[in-house]
């Protein structure tokens, strides 16, 4: 019998992401070996295979990579894929845009939200300058 | 050097229930009927089947359920579930299993009653906590996000997508078994209800019932059977993500890799293919797959479609049954791409039969552009 490998001790990566957002911080996993950022979190770096990527603080800024508006009887809501400046992408929505949802390439900035069924997650609001 | 698996597997039996709206039949009923039809097609018996490959949207243990219902004695089975592409993954596994003697007669089969059971896409529980908060329509919004990015990068327009829909309908009008055969105009397609921009109701595949099955044997055994064998020349599979936000590039699917592997095994190139079946769950899929499978350069499928290039009489025969957009789509459509290739290569296409079709390519997709599988089939002349 051998003991559990201590490299994997502590809360799992999904739980750490939730715990971080609950503290009001945005931290992405970065690989100590190859410096790649990744999302969603995992026990290993998907780029190089190194075990134990570390959560490091990020600004939560990025741009809209793609966006769809869902049309319902009650109006429209948007679903976006945002690419963070560090590289990883995540699904989210763009809130608070004056003239409807912004286009692909628009700069956005993250805010933390909470929902009883979904825990903590990031939404984005329009930021200033455009990006490619 | 010729790949050792090229042409070693034969599709000897094909079964298609052609029942797209069949209240009173469950998914297993559809599957069983298709399996019986496929075995009768080649003259083998259910008791000859010793390898089973199946996947169903509503069953977590498909091999057990299907083997019990069909009364199979199995030596080999594989219930790989990667969505609509599952059956082409199964085909690839079956090539190896047949060639190595793990089984002698493989049955690949599927059934669905999603239309008559409620008319909504049936999908297995598979929670995605990083997408759930945002209310994306599953799977449609994922494809809409890909379409929006394709428009941004390559100037693709809603009219281009509409021409995909019109081409599928034109083929469906030649197929008496297709579910939607009414004439359709560009204006009608463009004025369809917007659901998840840029995709409208007209950009979505049908929601149908259906059952499909194929019987596979080693090529040398096929000669003794009553049907005309179709040979599996090459296959390739690839998986790139589960959630759409994890797809590396929304305009480039892993069909690039699955296609490359299939062409390599078959020893053919895209310009040699006579007949193409691509999994059109949404109109954007046809454009993506024609590009990623090398029939046109990236970003140029729209031009081909606009000029009638994939419609009846066009330079590339694509989705000749009418596709998921106009023929049928029971939720996991992949097996139907193979069935139509078999029909064309056997010369059983009726009004939509292509002249001198020798090489056919079937391409299937699963999840949200997540799994990709390509198969290249040929007549005896291509061996």
Image: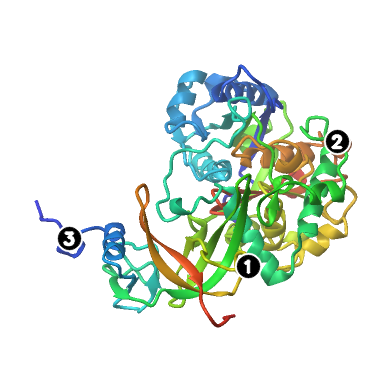
Task: Return the x and y of residue B176 as percentages of the image width and height.
Answer: 83, 30
Task: Return the x and y of residue B192 as percentages of the image width and height.
Answer: 76, 46
Q: CA distance from mark 2 to mark 3?
A: 62 Å
Relative to B340, say whether A23 is above or below. Answer: below
Q: Looking at the rendering, which quadrant does residue B298 occupy?
A: bottom right
Nearest to the eye among marks 2 and 3: give it: 2
Disc marking residue A9: 3
Where disc 2 sits, the SS reads: loop
Q: Horizontally, is B193 left or right of A71 in the view? A: right
Disc marking residue B182: 2
Task: Return the x and y of residue B36 as percentages of the image width and height.
Answer: 62, 21
Protein image colouring: rainbow
Nearest to the eye among marks 1 and 3: give it: 1
Q: Which residue is mark 1?
A: A99
Numbered-mark total: 3
Tell me if mark 3 has few (under 14), some (14-19) or many (20+) residues whose alpha carbon lies within 10 angstroms of its own.
few
Q: Horizontally, is A28 left or right of B28 in the view? A: left
Q: CA distance from mark 1 to mark 3?
A: 47 Å
The disc numbered 1 marks a residue on which chain?
A
Where disc 3 sits, the SS reads: loop
Residue at 86% over, 33% down:
B350
Which residue lies most toward the right here? B313
Choose the circle earlier in sequence order: 1 or 3.
3
């Amino acid at each position: 019998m051998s003991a559990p490998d201590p490299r994997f001790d502590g809360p799992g990566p999904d739980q750490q992401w939730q715990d971080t957002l609950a503290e009001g911080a945005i931290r992405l996993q970065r690989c100590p070996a190859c410096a790649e950022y990744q999302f969603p979190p995992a026990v290993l770096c998907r780029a190089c295979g190194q075990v134990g990527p570390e959560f490091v603080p990020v600004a939560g800024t990025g741009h809209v990579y793609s966006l769809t508006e869902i049309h319902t009887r009650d109006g429209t809501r948007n679903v976006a894929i945002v690419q963070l400046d560090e590289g990883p992408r995540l699904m989210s929505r763009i809130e608070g845009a004056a003239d409807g949802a912004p286009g692909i390439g628009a700069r956005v900035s993250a805010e933390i939200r909470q929902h009883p069924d979904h825990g903590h997650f990031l939404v984005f609001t329009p930021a200033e300058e455009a990006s490619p | 050097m010729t790949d050792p698996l090229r042409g070693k597997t034969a599709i000897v039996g094909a079964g298609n229930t052609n029942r797209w709206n069949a209240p009173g039949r469950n998914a297993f009923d559809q599957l069983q009927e298709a399996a019986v039809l496929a075995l009768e097609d080649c003259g083998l018996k259910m008791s000859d089947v010793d390898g089973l490959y199946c996947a169903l949207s509503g069953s977590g243990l498909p091999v057990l359920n299907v083997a019990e219902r069909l009364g199979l004695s199995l030596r080999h089975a594989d219930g790989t579930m990667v969505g609509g592409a599952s059956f082409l993954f199964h085909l690839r596994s079956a090539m190896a299993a047949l060639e190595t003697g793990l089984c002698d007669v493989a049955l690949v089969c599927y059934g669905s009653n999603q239309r008559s059971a409620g008319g909504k896409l049936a999908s297995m529980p598979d929670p995605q906590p990083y997408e759930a908060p945002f209310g994306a329509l599953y799977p449609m919004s994922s494809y809409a996000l890909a379409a929006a990015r394709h428009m941004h990068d390559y100037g693709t327009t809603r009219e281009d997508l509409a021409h995909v829909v019109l081409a599928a309908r034109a083929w469906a009008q030649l197929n008496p078994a297709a579910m939607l055969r009414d004439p359709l105009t560009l204006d009608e397609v463009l004025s369809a209800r917007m659901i998840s921009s840029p995709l409208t109701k007209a950009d979505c595949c049908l929601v149908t019932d259906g059952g499909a099955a194929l019987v596979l044997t080693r090529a040398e055994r096929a000669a003794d059977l009553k049907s005309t064998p179709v040979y599996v020349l090459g296959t390739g599979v690839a998986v790139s993500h589960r959630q759409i936000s994890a797809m590396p590039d929304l305009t480039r699917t892993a069909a690039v890799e699955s296609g490359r592997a299939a062409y390599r095994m078959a020893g053919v190139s895209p310009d040699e293919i006579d007949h193409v079946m691509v999994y059109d769950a949404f109109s954007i899929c046809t454009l993506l797959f024609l590009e990623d499978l090398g029939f046109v350069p990236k970003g140029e499928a729209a031009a081909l479609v606009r000029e009638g290039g994939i419609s009846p009489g066009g330079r590339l025969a694509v989705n000749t049954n009418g596709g998921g957009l106009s023929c049928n789509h029971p939720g996991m459509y992949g097996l139907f791409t193979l069935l139509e290739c078999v029909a064309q290569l056997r010369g059983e296409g009726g009004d939509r039969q292509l002249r001198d079709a020798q090489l056919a390519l079937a391409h299937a997709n699963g999840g949200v552009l997540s799994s990709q599988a390509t198969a290249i089939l040929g007549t005896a002349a291509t061996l």
